[in-house]
Amino acid sequence: MPKQTYDMIKSNVIILNCIAALGYFLSAKLGYYISAGNGFAMLIWPAAGVSIAFAIYFGSRVWPGIYLGAYFSTNLFGR
Amino acid sequence: MIFDDPALLFEAPHLFIMASGSTLQAVVAGSLVRRLDLFDHDFSNPYKIGQFFLLVGPVSCLISSTVGLITMSLMDINSFMSLLNEWFVWWIADWTSVVVVITIIFAWIKFDQVRRKIVTAVLAVSLIVTFSIIYVGRSWENERINLLFNQEVLAATNALKQIENSYLSLLNNMAGFKRFSSDINKENFETFSKNNLAFNNTVRSLTWINVVDHADREEFEASQKEVHGESYFIWEFSEDGSIVKAKPREQYHIVELIEPYNEYKVAVGYVIDNDDNRINAVNYSLENKSPALTSLVSLVYSEENQTKE
């Protein structure tokens, strides 16, 4: 990723949170399809890794995005 | 979704709490990694690598699974023991997924080109093999479940067809019996029933229901007393469930004969008019000249009702 784009995303909290929510949701969807819906505990849950990676890179200000992504994935995929 | 149904906020608060658990897990892991300065290293210090993966893996992943377990347990969504099993799978799944995903992301962002290619290739091959095994395993499992399901359905269908055929052949025999018997009485109904019930293991008893007009009630009752004894009367259940003489009505549908008689004779004289289930079937059958099937009916000669005698 070009440094300019990275800096722009990093400095804009709204865009950052949108990307975090989308990243969480898409990786949750991937986990859901891989695990074929085994109840609350999926066998593979990449969303957990994606959310932690976001928190490590961008700090705790991404929590609203992670929360949104987590809420929608919990609602739709049961986890 | 909450936007379609705002009541969900109150009906399914566990969804919000579980989402909070996932968020808390990420925020705590991120904060600890940053605070302990495990983030900006180049993955060459084994001690820091171990610390990093221990922290983001098994330690932080306890949060989401534990919050989920406590929430679902408090809301009685499942039994605690079953949830404990879910909790363990949840924790392991989060932990292993975090380790794999973080490694891939870090390899792409932090490593130089050569290390990135090596790590990516190794992880890509591992993931492809893992997913292939999961995919093939799942396909086999689906195939097995489908096969088992089809076998069960086939067995159930055959059993139901056999039962249906046995009912239909019995009904046809009864129709023939009525057509060729000038006078249906207790003796020839008993002979007919014995012959037919002996070869039919799905039917417990046979009942002959007569339709009697109110004008003929007394005459009918007198004729039945000759067959079943002086204690015979046309009866029904009262509202409180006790046996009473049938109230006058235009027409009576009366159990005239029943076999095996000694076992079920308590039902003789019973008026089925108040039993909507059976009377509807009788009327349908009479109107359409075809067999009719009812849902389960409570038999008057069941053990708890054997009080008439």
Image (cartoon, coloured by chain):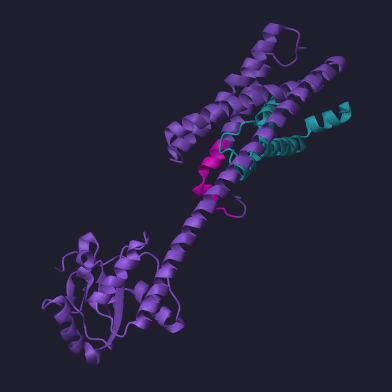
Image spot of residue B129 (x, y percent): 73, 26
The image quarter in which residue A49 lies: top right
> Between residues B18 and B210, which one lies in front from this camera angle?
B210
Q: Quadrant of the C terminus of chain B?
A: bottom left
> Between residues B228 and B56, which one lies in front from this camera angle?
B228
> Between residues B73 and B248, which one lies in front from this camera angle?
B248
Image spot of residue B61 (x, y percent): 59, 24
Q: Which chain is purple?
A: B
The image quarter in which residue B142 lies: top right
Looking at the picture, does residue B263 appear above or below residue B69?
A: below
- On the picture, is B175 further left or further right than B232? right
Examine the structure image and report whether residue B305 is included in the region drawn in magenta: no
Examine the structure image and report whether residue B16 is included in the region drawn in magenta: yes
At 52% across and 49% down in the image, what residue appears?
B152
At 82% across and 17% down in the image, what residue appears?
B118
Identity of the residue furthest to the bottom in this view: B215
Labels in figure, total: 0
- On the picture, is A52 further left or further right than B192? right
Looking at the picture, does residue B11 appear above or below residue A33?
A: below
Which segment did they paint magenta? B5-18
Q: Which chain is cyan?
A: A
Dominant secondary structure (helix, strand or loop) of the stretch shown in magenta:
helix
Residue A32 at least partly seen: no
Residue B187 at least partly seen: yes
Image spot of residue B183 (x, y percent): 28, 84
Looking at the picture, does residue B270 appear above or below residue B152?
A: below
- On the picture, is B178 further left or further right than B87? left
- On the picture, is B294 further left or further right than B89? left
Image spot of residue B162 (x, y percent): 46, 60
At 35% across and 80% down in the image, what residue appears?
B178
At 19% across and 89% down in the image, what residue appears?
B219
